[in-house]
Amino acid sequence: MDAARFPNLHVSQHPLVAHKLALLRDRATEPKKFRELVRELSWLLGYEAMADLTTQPITVETPLEPTAGVELEPKVGLVPVLRAGLGMVDAMLELMPSAEVWHIGLYRDERTLKPVEYYNKLPDAATVQVCLILDPMLATGGSSSATVDILKQWGAARVKQVSLIAAPEGVATLSAAHPDVDIHVAAVDRALNDRGYIVPGLGDAGDRQFGTFAGPSSEPGHDPADETAEVVRRLQRNLASEP
Ligand code: PRP
Ligand code: URA
């Protein structure tokens, strides 16, 4: 994809990120190792995503004398999107122990690929200024766009998306809906397939972390592929037609 079209997109260039991502993609990587890699990649991407947080000056007393230091200015909220975003939280909390964690529950309807909200306990008014949405996969962009809508309505002044892998369609959708949201990823892959999965991708990030490979059974006699393929074709037409 032409990354220059998306000034809000930040694809990590760090060799450690690339190395760990290849291990994460490998179908032979079992859930325990997969969870470790999600955590390590989240740490590295989080470090990059927080590089422009503002600071304010403070004075610290060393054992010898006072000196100038800084502290982070904004209050930061980590917003893992259930389920798969859960695996990214601990690493981010290591980086920023005072961050608040606000969970949002969304799943994708397998036919329409639209996000369905099932958990949101945000208080009435925002308690943080900067929110980092944590979700390993930015596929159609529907889940992340919906989460940004929720956070902006809540009153968050600034929102960033941190994902491990994005599809070009998802980057385009999120950027069109929310051009002010920075997107930090380890890689942007080739495309979505006709079931809305990122290819080459890594498969289902939630199932691979939590070992739930059986998945929900489909309705007998219904093949969602036709509907989802049409949704994906529409997203691909949008991506191609944007300037
Ligand atoms: C996955 C993923 C994202 C969403 C991305 O969640 O973790 O939340 O899909 O897709 P989108 O960009 O097309 O919206 P899923 O619905 O599989 O739920 P899970 O995390 O509970 O497995
Ligand atoms: N969700 C995933 O877990 N993987 C994909 O490829 C797309 C959505």
Image (spheres, rainbow, N blue to C red):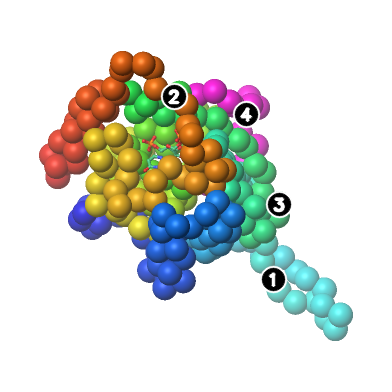
What stretch of residues is rendered in magenta? 117-134
Name the front one of labels 2 and 3: 2
User: In what element is the residue under mark 1?
Assistant: strand
Q: Please tell me which residue lies in front, 239 or 4.
A: 239
- Position of the N terminus, as image quadrant, is bottom left
Q: Tell me how far mark 2 sits from mark 1, CA to CA.
A: 56 Å
**Left-right relation of 13 to 211:** left
User: In what element is the residue under mark 4?
Assistant: loop
**Residue 151, percent from left and from top:** 51, 33
Asked if the residue at tag 1 contacts the one at tag 2, i.e. Cβ–Cβ closer than 8 Å, the answer is no
Q: Where does label 3 land, which residue?
A: 98
Q: Where does label 2 land, which residue?
A: 217
Q: Tell me how far mark 2 sits from mark 3, CA to CA.
A: 41 Å
Q: Where does label 1 land, which residue?
A: 69
Q: Tell me how far mark 4 sits from mark 3, CA to CA.
A: 18 Å
**What's the residue at 27%, 42% (across, down)?**
192
Q: Tell me how far mark 1 sits from mark 3, CA to CA.
A: 18 Å
Q: Quadrant of ligand 2?
A: top left
Name the front one of labels 4 and 1: 4
Total tally of numbered discs in the picture: 4
Q: Amino acid at mark 3?
A: Ser
Number of the label disc, if any, that sits on residue 122? 4
Q: Please tell me which residue lies in front, 218 or 119.
A: 218
Of callouts 4 and 2, which one flags the residue occurring earlier in the amino acid sequence?
4
